[in-house]
């Protein structure tokens, strides 16, 4: 990493305001009227558009693309926040579209994280202390409350609202306009307001190389858990007993058993 002074690089527009302490990788581009505050680090070949604000304590990875009017690392919208030193992180090759807001953490976690190879479409909001995994897609107007965890390969369709402290596990797909108030297990398709189980994420799993046999077994597990006439506790015990040898059973069971908000 090299440290640049204000506007002394041909890749930083003359109208951009960049603090002298900002650490730039190689071939970073900063567009007109963008503001980059002290203590920011930006990785190689990241492109920052016009009117972007990157606030103190933010780290941006390599080869990211940040479109105009995005705000990253601003203070959280949490009345308990008292100005403590916290951070925001964005991984490599993540695309952040227009008007996205990513708030930094509070003392509860100390940071907000968005992983690598993600796509955050226009007007997405990621609140304080959220942790977003890798290869996540969040469509337009999706909003995460504070302390939300989004695992790898999750897709949130347009206008999805996720209540604070919810967890959405890997490879889940949430339909447009859904209201998520409880935890969403891995590999499923969920939709509605409030959100409900709608089957497994067959299309997404097929695209990611899950075999037909694996998809059938996942369908059997969730049919047993969500559709059986028995209560869910009994259903989960049956899954543990009858499908213990399936390679994804432990992941599903552990997620369900560790849920604090309950399962959708």
Image (cartoon, helix red, strand yellow):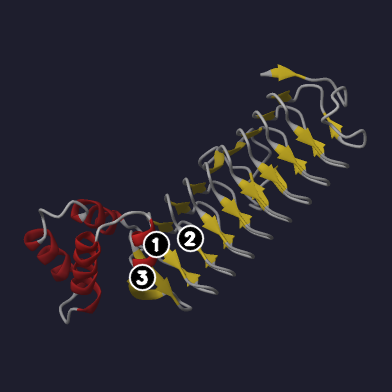
Q: Is 232 in front, or is 123?
A: 123
The quadrant in which residue 223 appears is bottom left
| Disc number lying in front (2 or 1) | 1
Tell me the element at label 1. helix
- Between discs 2 and 1, the one toward the N terminus: 2
Q: Position of residue 74 (x, y in %)?
A: 71, 44
Quick one: SS at disc 3?
loop
The quadrant of the rendering that contains the N terminus is top right
Residue that badge 1 annotates: 204
State the separation of the CA atoms marked 2 and 3: 17 Å
Q: Which residue is mark 3?
A: 264
In the picture provided, is 179 more to the left or to the right than 182?
right
Q: Secondary structure at mark 2?
A: strand
Sequence-earlier tag: 1 or 3: 1
Label 2 – label 1 distance at C-alpha? 9 Å
Mark 2 or mark 3: which is in front?
Answer: 2
C-beta proximity under 8 Å, tags 2 and 3: no
Residue at image point 88% right, 35% down: 13
- For the residues marked 1 and 3, what is the alpha-carbon distance in whole angstroms? 20 Å
Q: Does the residue at mark 2 contact the one at mark 1 (Cβ under 8 Å)? A: yes
Q: Disc number at residue 155?
A: 2
Task: Give x and y (percent) for residue 217.
Answer: 19, 64
Q: Pick the quarter of the image with the C terminus.
A: bottom left
Q: In screen coordinates, is 167 left or right of 99?
A: left
Label ID, residue 50: none
Q: Residue furthest right?
A: 15
Q: Is residue 74 visible?
A: no
Q: Residues within 10 Å of mark 3 (few under 14, many from 20)?
A: some
In the rendered image of this protein, does residue 183 appear above or below residue 196?
A: above
């Amino acid at each position: 990493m090299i440290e640049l002074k204000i506007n002394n690089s041909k890749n930083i527009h003359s109208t951009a305001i960049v603090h002298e302490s900002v650490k730039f990788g190689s071939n970073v581009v900063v567009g007109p009227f963008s503001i980059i505050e002290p203590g920011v680090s930006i990785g190689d070949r990241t492109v920052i558009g016009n009117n972007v604000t990157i606030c103190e304590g933010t780290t941006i990875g390599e080869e990211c693309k940040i479109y105009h009017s995005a705000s990253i690392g601003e203070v959280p919208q949490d009345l308990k926040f008292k100005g403590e030193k916290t951070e925001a992180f964005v991984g490599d090759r993540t695309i952040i579209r227009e008007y996205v807001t990513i708030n930094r953490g509070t003392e509860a976690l100390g940071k907000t994280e968005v992983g690598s190879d993600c796509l955050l479409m226009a007007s997405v909001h990621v609140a304080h202390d959220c942790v977003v995994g890798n290869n996540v897609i969040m469509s337009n107007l999706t909003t995460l409350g504070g302390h939300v965890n989004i695992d790898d390969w999750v897709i949130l369709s347009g206008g999805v609202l996720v209540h604070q402290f919810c967890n959405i596990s890997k490879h889940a797909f949430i339909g447009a306009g859904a209201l998520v108030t409880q935890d969403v297990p891995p590999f499923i398709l969920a939709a509605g307001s409030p959100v409900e189980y709608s089957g497994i994420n067959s299309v997404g799993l097929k695209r990611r190389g899950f075999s037909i046999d694996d998809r059938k077994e996942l369908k059997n597990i969730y049919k047993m858990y969500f559709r059986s006439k028995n209560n869910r506790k009994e259903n989960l015990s049956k899954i543990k007993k009858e499908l213990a040898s399936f390679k994804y059973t432990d992941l599903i069971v552990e997620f369900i058993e560790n849920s604090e908000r309950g399962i959708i």
